């Protein structure tokens, strides 16, 4: 089991993880934080499970993890000022917290596969799933689910992206408490930037656009929400600044429309009304 005392010694946050619940086995940490509102009330609450019976990935996929080998947990956010209009940045902050922690602690170079995967040498080491609950027309709570492959030695099944673990990359056992504390500490730092200085939101890991379907889906959602006559430009402008910067770097001199056209040539977008 996770050593809570060891974790607490390494935790250096004001609110993230200060309410920490450790459960040996649960259906889903994300679902529990979303539905059991009387039990889990405070922003920053972390619900950690050694085993999730129905761990979730994006698009209805399951997340498989061997008990007591990895990190599988969810974080509750309830600050309305932070939540409003900043979901994409919170998603990026979550990925960065994991990637930067791995890089700083273990000197393993990470890449971010938008919107929610962290890769090492093109292999998946972590996944993120953000879910929300709505009261009336307002987002009541955000739950950030994180899964990190830490000490797992083998992976069974078929995968879109080959999985790996930090142990497999370094050939040694990793302290889960050290990594978890690092991620929670870094996540709070990234949230502060999102809240106070979102225009300065920067990143170190490189985004991996070799597989662009997820980016594509996100752009398509932005297009459907656009009200201007030029929804394609609106969609590109809606991307987080870090992603736009990389797209421009890889397509120097291209206009916003040209960037979307470049993506369309790889995976055509469905037709939408202008």
Image: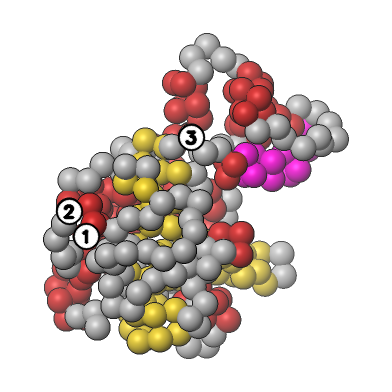
In-front residue for pair 231/152: 152
Quadrant of the image containing the C terminus:
top right
- Image: 178 above or below 53: above
Report the number of discs: 3
List x then y, in percent, for residue 262.
61, 22
Would residue 19 be seen by someone viewing this image from the given angle? no
List x then y, in percent, for residue 124.
39, 52
Would residue 71 be seen by someone viewing this image from the given angle? yes
* 95 sits left or right of 58 in the view: left
Occupied quadrant, residue 67:
bottom left
The residue that mark 1 highlights is 167
Give the extent of the magenta segment.
Answer: 216-228
Specify the principal SS of the magenta part. helix
The residue that mark 2 highlights is 170
Kindly indicate whether the residue at mark 1 contacts the one at mark 2 (C-beta within 8 angstroms).
Answer: yes
Q: Say which element carries label 2.
A: helix
């Amino acid at each position: 089991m996770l050593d809570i005392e060891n974790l607490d010694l390494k935790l250096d946050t004001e609110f993230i993880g200060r309410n920490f619940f450790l459960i040996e086995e649960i259906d889903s940490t994300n679902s529990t934080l979303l539905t059991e509102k009387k039990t889990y009330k405070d922003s920053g609450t972390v619900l950690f499970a050694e085993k999730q019976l129905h761990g979730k990935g994006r698009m209805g996929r399951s997340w498989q993890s061997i008990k007591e080998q990895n990190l599988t947990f969810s974080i509750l956010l309830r600050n309305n000022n932070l939540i409003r209009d900043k979901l994409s940045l919170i998603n990026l902050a979550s990925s960065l917290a994991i990637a930067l922690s791995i890089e700083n602690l273990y000197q393993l170079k990470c890449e971010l596969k938008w919107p929610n995967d962290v890769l090492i040498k093109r292999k998946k080491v972590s996944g993120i799933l953000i879910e929300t609950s709505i009261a009336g027309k307002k987002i009541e709570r955000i739950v950030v689910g994180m899964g990190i492959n830490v000490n797992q030695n083998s992976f069974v099944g078929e995968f879109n992206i080959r999985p790996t673990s930090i142990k497999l990359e370094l050939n040694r056992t990793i302290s889960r408490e050290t990594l978890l504390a690092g991620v929670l500490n870094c996540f709070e730092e990234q949230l502060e930037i999102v809240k106070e200085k979102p225009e300065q939101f920067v990143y170190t890991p490189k985004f991996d656009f070799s597989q662009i379907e997820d980016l594509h889906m996100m752009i398509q959602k932005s297009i459907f929400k656009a009200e201007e006559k030029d929804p394609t430009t609106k969609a590109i402008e809606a991307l987080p600044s870090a992603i736009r910067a990389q797209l421009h770097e890889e397509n120097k001199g291209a206009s916003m429309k040209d960037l979307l056209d470049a993506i369309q040539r790889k995976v055509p977008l469905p037709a939408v009304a202008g």
